[in-house]
Amino acid sequence: MTSSLLWGLILALHLLCITYWVGGAIFCLQSRRTTRLLEAQQASTVLLQTYGRYLRALCHVVPVAIISGIALIIHAGPHLPWPFHLMAFCGLIMIVIFLTMLFGPLRAARRAIRPQPQLFTSLHRRAALMALIGAIAIIAGALGGGA
């Protein structure tokens, strides 16, 4: 009983991390539409703060998601169905996208006196790709069942 409770909590922690990761990317995408009502300088400030806070929080969420995901894979055993392999692959791609966002356009936008719109366009495209791949990972996890 205690063992199943522990693994249920690890799964819940993993799902909470993924929910923040994918949901935050979708929120950042929606912030672009909202900032169209603002002046250019105000819009840049809002977008910079939005992406900065989201990616800073992901610096804590991503390691927890990785550790809990590896623990769940080890617990499930060596013969996992293909959806779990797809889910893990999507997770790796999402990690790479996160790191390129953090150390690429976000860093450049923070260092710029007046961030150029193409930096935010790059952030939006990467967030959209991360949300899409995250949705694929979620669907793959659902297809995998309870392995």
Image (spheres, helix red, strand yellow):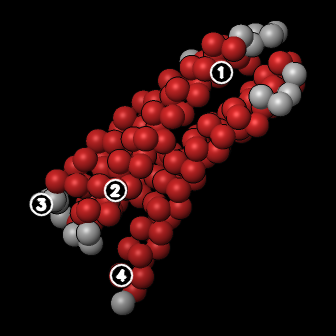
Quadrant containing the C terminus is: bottom left
- The x, y position of residue 30, in whole percent, is 66, 40
Q: CA distance from mark 4 to mark 3?
A: 21 Å
- Label number found at residue 139: 2
Residue at x-position 57% and y-position 41%: 25
Earlier sequence position, callout 3 versus callout 2: 3
Earlier sequence position, callout 2 versus callout 1: 1
Q: Give 101 or 47, whichever is nearer the viewer.
A: 47
The residue type indicated by label 1 comes to Phe
Q: Secondary structure at mark 3?
A: loop
Earlier sequence position, callout 4 versus callout 2: 4
The residue type indicated by label 3 comes to His
Residue at x-position 79% and y-position 22%: 44
Q: Which residue is mark 4?
A: 3
Horizontal placement of 124 versus 8: left or right? Answer: right
Quadrant containing the N terminus is: bottom left
Horizontal placement of 39 versus 56: left or right? Answer: right
Q: CA distance from mark 1 to mark 3?
A: 42 Å
- Label number found at residue 79: 3
Q: Is 69 above or below relative to 59?
A: below
- Label number found at residue 120: 1
- The x, y position of residue 96, in whole percent, is 42, 30
Residue 49 position by quadrant = top right
Q: CA distance from mark 3 to mark 2?
A: 20 Å
Residue 144 is at least partly visible in this image:
yes
The residue type indicated by label 2 comes to Ile
